[in-house]
Amino acid sequence: MKIIMKSKFITFFAILLGAAGVALADHHGNKIEITANDTMQFNSKAFEVAAGKEVTLVFKNLGNLPKAAMGHNVVILKPGTATATYGMAAVSAAASEYIPQDDANKALVVAHTKLLGPGEEDTITFTLEPGEYPFVCSFPGHFGLMNGVITAK
Ligand code: CO
């Protein structure tokens, strides 16, 4: 019973945070979960994590459309990176699942997941210095809708 109460309590706060638009990392694990769907949406555009501590990012593609038509990834970029510029560069990087391999673009990437097809998931870990890190899905045409910011503090 106590466990059920706690679960409801957490859900209540998750709803409040959702309304505020910022998804906070789990306090103990510094873990965030990002999902994507067939309408080119991430579950949230704003995440907050603790700086200087390993972050676990679990990314899930909840969609049904084939990977070739509606693949999704999460590419975390250095603070100040223009997501549109990166997204445009990524269009021609099909051979590397839309992660450009030239030195200039590679230098902009802090971490990235695999490109996921329907029902797939990937977990990555990384550690951030304090700052605001833009993230995008770099699948062609997605960065305009599929973008957000991870704030580390
Ligand atoms: Co996408």
Image (spheres, rainbow, N blue to C red):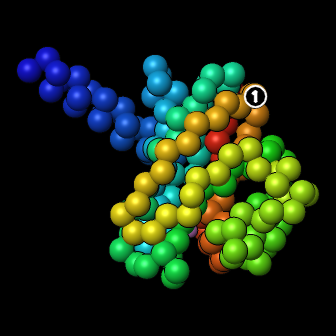
Residue 45 x/y as whole percent: 57, 52
Q: Nearer the viewer, residue 49 or 103?
A: 103
Q: Name the residue at the front extreme.
A: 95
Query: Who's the residue at 31% across and 29% down the image?
Result: 10
Q: Nearer the viewer, residue 4 or 112?
A: 112
78 relative to 137, above or below: above
Q: Is residue 143 visible?
A: no
For the N terminus, the image quarter is: top left
Query: Who's the residue at 91% across and 57% down the image?
Result: 104
Residue 37 x/y as whole percent: 43, 67
Q: Nearer the viewer, residue 117 or 70?
A: 117
For the C terminus, the image quarter is: top right
Figure quadrant, ligand 1: bottom right
In the image, taking residue 80 as reference, residue 140 lies left or right, namely left
Query: Who's the residue at 75% across and 28% down the image?
Result: 129
- Which residue is denoted by mark 1 in the rendering? 129
Q: Is residue 28 visible?
A: yes
Residue 43 x/y as whole percent: 46, 55
Query: Who's the residue at 69% across and 74% down the image?
Result: 95
Disc 1 residue type? Glu
Residue 36 x/y as whole percent: 47, 61
- Cβ at disc 1 under 8 Å from ligand 1: no
Q: Name the residue at the right extreme.
A: 104
Q: How many marks?
A: 1
Q: Secondary structure at mark 1?
A: loop
In the image, taking residue 29 as reference, residue 99 lies left or right, namely right
Dot 1 surroundings within 10 Å: few (below 14), some, or many (20 or more)?
few
19 relative to 42, above or below: above
